[in-house]
Image (cartoon, helix red, strand yellow):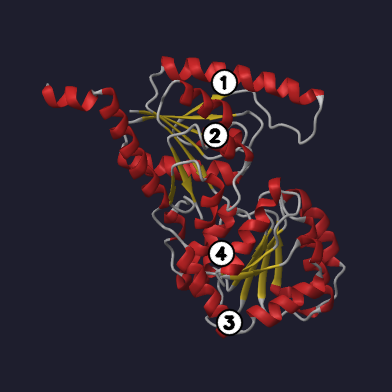
Amino acid sequence: MKIVFTGGGTGGHVYPALAIYSAYKKRFPNAKFYYVGTNHGLESSVVPNEDLEFIKIDVFGFKRKICFENFKRLYKAYNAMRKMKRFLKNESIDLVIGTGGYVSGPVLYAASKLKIPTMIHEQNVFPGLTNRFLAKRVTKVAISFEESKKYFQSADTFLVGNPIRTDEFSISREVARTNLKLDKDEFFIVSFGGSGGHIKLNNSILEYLENTPLKANWIHITGKKHFEDFSEKLKSIRNQNKKNFKAISYSNNTPELITAADLVIVSAGAIAISEICAAGVASLLVPKAYTTNNHQEFNAKMIKSQKAGEMILEKDLNGKILKEMIENCFYDREKNMKYRINSKKIAKFSSADDIVNMAELILEENKWKKGEVLKEAWL
């Protein structure tokens, strides 16, 4: 069996693909796996650390305006598609799974032209442009939220949630808090703005600390490129309680931090939301205003509608609003517990395995269509 994964640009596309790959590898250790990505997306630094072959293609996303650069990028996409057709045919690939991002377009389009079984996974409530384009051409569309169905009306969809590496969230809340040396009843806040950080969130937290006594332990992940500036500004704040506040540039231990938290303040990326729900934690979501099609706002509204957390639009965010939300919604332990319970209800722990199960059904159906099952039975 030979399977290709593709998806890239950001962690929101790369990590779900790797979670599905992990589930597939566990079940079919002798299968051959490939990952198609670019040399400039996050996949170029993450995927080579995994045990699968990394295939690079030269492709870029289109600019959202009419310009000559888009013609150059269209030509690159065409060449990438031709390269993928040759590769998929020569390697006799059995299945292609895409998790979004512009890199997945040429790969899945080539596979569909060759009539190779294909599947895409959409992480967000509001689907990305590439997945909307591919939806009519692939065999199956896996969605993470029920609300996404209306955007894929002509496609064959099934609901699975967001694939995350569930082993990273197998630790209990009690153990996570013990590891972080937190008291049993101590309120603990974790905040971060995605892999690139979130300037508006950083500045609003500084404003909060400047004017508000801190009643909790708080760890904030600034993003590597913002850490030095944030740290310098933090030094000038004379709040006596800021000793309970810790700023770090990046963490390899976010699953444990999230699991231990009473509240997570974060931008509304789909994977971050899925991890928060897996841990059963209340959230305050600040969707980034400049994301494609404003998809983070759709994600945040879904969480708010399920009473699993609250949201603040980026344009409204400041230290004063942050203070009101934390004190009115989250220091209220009864309300916080309701958010945590509802958050856990949204979580789907079998997403990666469910995708593998569906992929196997697709492959079996493809065998029937080609008559291979009948041949095997006869032989």
Residue 378 image position (x, y, % from top left): 12, 23
Q: Along the polypeptide, which appears first: circle 3 or circle 4?
A: 4
Marks 1 and 3, how far apart in space? 51 Å
Q: Quadrant of the C terminus?
A: top left
- Quarter where residue 59 is shown: top right
Q: Along the polypeptide, which appears first: circle 4 or circle 1?
A: 1
Q: Quadrant of the N terminus?
A: top left
Dot 1 crowding, Cα within 10 Å, few <14, some 14–19, many 20+:
many
Q: Along the polypeptide, which appears first: circle 2 or circle 3?
A: 2
- Residue 335's tag is 3
* Whether residue 90 is visible: yes
Q: Residue furthest right?
A: 236
- Quarter where residue 116 is shown: top left
Residues tagged 4 and 1 counted as in contact (Cβ below 8 A): no
Residues tagged 2 and 3 counted as in contact (Cβ below 8 A): no
Tag nearer the camera, 1 or 2: 2
* Whether residue 209 is visible: no
Q: Along the polypeptide, which appears first: circle 1 or circle 3?
A: 1
Tag nearer the camera, 1 or 3: 1
Dot 4 crowding, Cα within 10 Å, few <14, some 14–19, many 20+:
many
